[in-house]
Image (cartoon, rainbow, N blue to C red):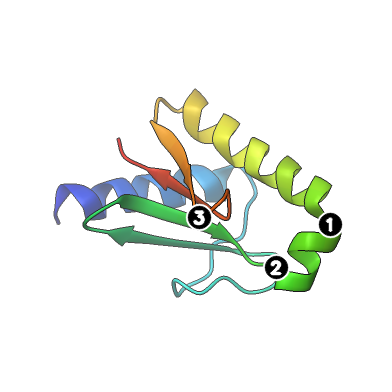
Amino acid sequence: MSTGEDLEQLVRRELTNAGFIIEPTPMSADGGLGVWHDPTRGVVITWGASAERLVKYSTIRDAVQLALRTILADAGHQVREDFNGLELVVTS
């Protein structure tokens, strides 16, 4: 397994242990997380909510993003936002 794939598995395990639902495919379903390794960016995480809900419930989206960032930072990962905060990218 490559370093990127190892990091993806580690991120998946940490988020699952924290109680998040990780979807089996990169596309996140309503309420679940999409997690995949992008060789050019790192491990990408998206929270599955429709575009309408992302706008309507921006406070909830912000809370979910904060929870994800906190869990990953506490685990020692470097995390940045991408696509105006719609994705989190773990680089180490």
Q: Earlier in the sequence, mark 1 or mark 3?
A: 1
Which residue is found at the position 64% from the left and 67% from the top? 48
Q: Where is residue 81 shown, x and y percent of the image?
A: 49, 43
Q: Which residue is mark 1?
A: 57
Which residue is found at the position 14% from the left and 56% from the top? 1
Q: CA distance from mark 1 to mark 3?
A: 17 Å
Front in this rendered view, residue 51 or 66: 51
Are there few (<14), some (14-19), or many (20+) residues within 10 Å of tag 1? few
Residue 6 is tagged as none
Element carrying mark 3: loop
State the quadrant of the C terminus: top left
Q: Where is residue 66 shown, x and y percent of the image?
A: 66, 36
Front in this rendered view, residue 63 or 22: 63
Q: Earlier in the sequence, mark 2 or mark 1?
A: 2
Residue 83 is tagged as 3
| Residues at discs 2 and 1 in contact (Cβ within 8 Å) | yes
Element carrying mark 2: loop
Q: Is residue 58 above or below residue 28?
A: above
Q: Where is residue 41 shown, x and y percent of the image?
A: 29, 51
| Residues at discs 1 and 3 in contact (Cβ within 8 Å) | no
1 to the left or right of 30:
left
Element carrying mark 1: loop
